[in-house]
Each structure stands twice: as C-alpha cells, then as structure tokens.
Image (cartoon, grey):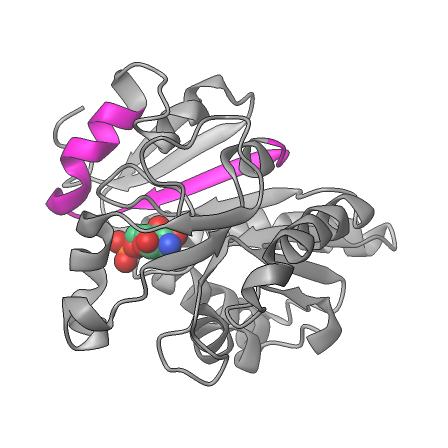
Amino acid sequence: MTYEVFATQQEAVKNLAAEVAELIRSRAAEGKGVVLGLATGASPLGFYAELIRLHKEEGLSFKNVTTFNLDEYYGLPREHVESYWYFMHTNLFNHIDIPAENINLPSGTVAQEDIEAHCQAYEDKIKACGGLDLQILGIGRTGHIGFNEPGSDDTTRTRQVHLDDLTKTDAAPAFGGFENVPSYAITMGVATIMDAKKLRLMAWGEKKASIVNKAINGPVTADVAASYLQKHPDAKYFLDAAAASEL
Ligand code: GLP
C-alpha cells in the first residue's frame, strides 16, 4: 500500500484520471474491456468531472468500460435524488458514452426475501466480467469503504448492512435530517473490494485526517475496514495536505 500527498485535490484527481484513462485506452487498443469499481460521496466528484472532461475534450471513450458500484441505500428507488443510482447518472454516466447495459449498482428496492440472491448475483456478475480491474474508494469517518462499517472483516462479501450512527449523521444534511437517512444499505464486502486488482482511495480535508492516519498507520482490523488496504498488493491513497496532516 502506498499514498501520495498532492498540493491540491485538482492535481490529485487529474493524476488518478490519467491512470484510469490510460488503462481504458490500452485495453481498447487490444480490443478488450475494463471493469471499474466506482464509489459515491463528495470525494470522487472532482475525479468524475475530470473523466467527463477527458471524454468531451480529449475523446476518451467509455464504450469498453463496465462498472460496478460499491453500494446503494436500501429503501431508495433509483429516482430518489439521494440514491447512488441517481448520483452516478447525474455526476458521471449521463455525460459519457458508457453503454447503459454496462452499468451495475446494487438495487435499493429488491424485496427483503430476495436480498441474498441479489447480492450473490452481484458477486457472480463481477466474476463473470473477469473481476474488478480498478476499484475507486472514498473513506467514511468510521473507516468504512463502501458501507463496510466497523465489524466488517476481510471475509465479507456483498450483503445488506446496518449503517452506523456517525455515517447517518454525516449523511443527514443531504437527507434533510438524521431521521430521513436510510438505516440499511447493500454494499460490496471487504473481500469483494480486496479482490480488485488495483485499489485507489481518495480523501480530502482535515475531517478525514484522523481516520486516514488510523487506516494507514493503525493495526489491520475489522474496526477500520480501510485498514485492510495495508494488505493489498496494489492499493494507493490519493490525499491532499489536510487529509494527510496526521500521518
Ligand atoms: C458514504 C459512501 C462511501 C463514501 C463515504 C464518504 O458512506 N457509502 O462510499 O466513501 O460516504 O463520503 P464523502 O466522500 O462524501 O466524505
């Protein structure tokens, strides 16, 4: 696992987007596809804006790209403005040429009794596509990646999870209050994420400094799911100076 501290978030996301663009182009040149794992939240917004710019201004095509998102709130339909389906379409998919059939997110509306089969199908589809080539990550203040809250160990796979109160507190403004934040989500597990060939985690600002330090320098533990990145052969943190200030 490595990390790099950039002068600005803009510089960091340009660097990461260039790496992803190179991966997409080199695979396209071989007539092959790329499987990207994607994340939501504020952290990857600049990265998605840069991918859109590369598409519009530099001809980067996403026709050979398949995506799997990390997670989705349970109980939210796709049209809900806080659903991750809506987030991804608004902030990325609607602005690039990715084929709609290549886009995968867990469902927020699958019936409770069908959740297990739905999660297994998600895992199976990732495998059938050849596995995740590169997984984009943010980090929550509980140390979660996806929605793998404290207690999620490195055997966890795609499943329904209960959200931590701190996670709900952080999401409360967007939902107009804590009580409106869904209590459950469907998320890839730590093992699903660790199976990706490359992991790229973005964290910005001093609010993330403490948890970034714990994840990078603390023990590898299910209490901080991001700490498992220490055991991954090709994981990298992209940080700004504020997020790196406690390292
Ligand atoms: C949510 C998402 C995570 C994300 C985290 C941090 O909980 N499920 O994937 O990393 O929020 O969000 P932000 O980037 O807005 O700080």
Q: Image quarter for residue 90?
A: bottom left
Query: Residue 49: x percent and y percent?
Result: 42, 69
Residue 83 on the magenta segment: no
* Identity of the residue furthest to the front in this view: 113
Query: Residue 16: x percent and y percent?
Result: 46, 48
Query: Relative to 212, is 28 on the left or the right?
Result: right
Q: Nearer the viewer, residue 72 or 179?
A: 179
Q: Image quarter for residue 196?
A: top right
Q: Residue at x 42, y 54 (%)?
A: 14
Residue 207 on the magenta segment: yes
**Region rendered in magenta:** 195-215
| For residue 210, above or below residue 42 | above
Query: Relative to 36, is 146 on the left or the right?
Result: left
| For residue 155, above or below residue 137 | above
Quadrant that contains the N terminus: top left
Query: Relative to 64, is 59 on the left or the right?
Result: left
